[in-house]
Image: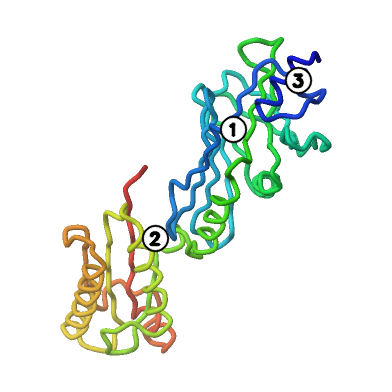
Amino acid sequence: MNKFAAIILSLLGFAASPLAEAMDKRYVATPNQSQWQMVANTPLECRLVHPIPHYGDAEFSSRASKKINLDFELKMRRPMGETRNVSLVSMPPAWRPGDGAERITTMKFFQQFDGYVGGQTAWGILGELEKGRYPTFSYQDWQSRDQRIEVALSSVLFRQKYSVFSDCISNLLPYSFEDISFTILHYDRTSVQLNKASQKRLQQIAEYIRHNQDIDLVLVSTYTDSTDSRSASQNLSEQRAEVLRDYFESLGLPEDRIQVQGYGKRRPIDDNSSPIGKDKNRRVVISLGRTQV
């Protein structure tokens, strides 16, 4: 590598290395271009985005779930034309010339899709950025077989936004939409109030709805056991349904998005001749629908 080429690599933020010599196309934000942006910071979703000039965006995301999760996507302006094997290498910045490149792993980027990395490898990319290094993806150009592409994430100005991103992840709700979209809750006998365990579950549903503007339908179906007469059971069932309608309206849901129905002692799911069966039949089924995005 001649001296002029070495200077250019340094300006781009890379230390000279055998890997760098072999590359023909490089995409990386210069120190002046490097930006990290929190584009979503809610109890439902955290997203941290890094624009890569002339290439696309690098995006880390984590969502409300029972398990801590992290996804990384290399969003390309022009998706891959062919499936490619990709090397992921951690490169030192130009101002740390004594450090060497460290190979992280290999993976595949698939035709017509953005590059995806999940699980422990995604956390590893964050770790390398936190160290001040440049995680770098390397693959053969699908348009020109004698060229390779190198795409790097700049660690300049990363740490401050990473702190915000980490705080966001720690505040994500510990359940997802799928966890609460179909829920069966239970009542104490003759009461229009849910039992304590079900009240806690209902609070989780409410917390999710407060932060999600995409919920467009709540279906509430209430049922009783067979203890009372048909008319009394129907009346109690309808009272329970109306209490829940009022509750969901208090969360800000429009009235036309809430549908409630009291079924009384119709449609039992267990034997009403036993106390356990009656407890199961004395229930409410809540189904949530949301806008598909």
User: What's the amino acid at mark 2?
Assistant: Ser
Residue at screen point 19% across, 60% down: 254
Question: Of residues 42 and 99, which is closer to you in this image?
Answer: 99
Front of the two marks 2 and 1: 1
Residue at screen point 46% across, 59% down: 176
Front of the two marks 1 and 3: 3
Q: How many numbered marks, from 0 up?
A: 3
Label number found at residue 6: 3
User: Where is residue 34, by image quadrant?
Assistant: top right
Question: Compared with residue 128, is residue 282 higher up or lower down, i.e. above or below?
Answer: below
Mark 1 surroundings: few (<14), some (14-19) or many (≥20) residues within 10 A: many
Q: Where is residue 117 in the image (x, y as percent from the top left)?
A: 63, 40
User: What's the amino acid at mark 1?
Assistant: Gly
Could you say whether the residue bearing mark 3 is in a helix, strand or loop? helix
Q: Name the residue under label 1.
A: 115
Measured Cα–Cα span from mark 2 to mark 3: 56 Å
Front of the two marks 2 and 3: 3
Question: Of residues 263 and 1, which is closer to you in this image?
Answer: 1
Looking at the figure, which quarter contains the C terminus? top left
Question: Compared with residue 190, is residue 40 higher up or lower down, i.e. above or below?
Answer: above
Could you say whether the residue bearing mark 1 is in a helix, strand or loop? strand
User: What's the amino acid at mark 3?
Assistant: Ala
Left or right of 100 on screen, residue 80: left
Could you say whether the residue bearing mark 2 is in a helix, strand or loop? loop
Left or right of 137 on screen, residue 271: left
Q: Name the residue under label 2.
A: 181
N-term mark: 1 or 3: 3
Residue at screen point 70% across, 33% down: 107
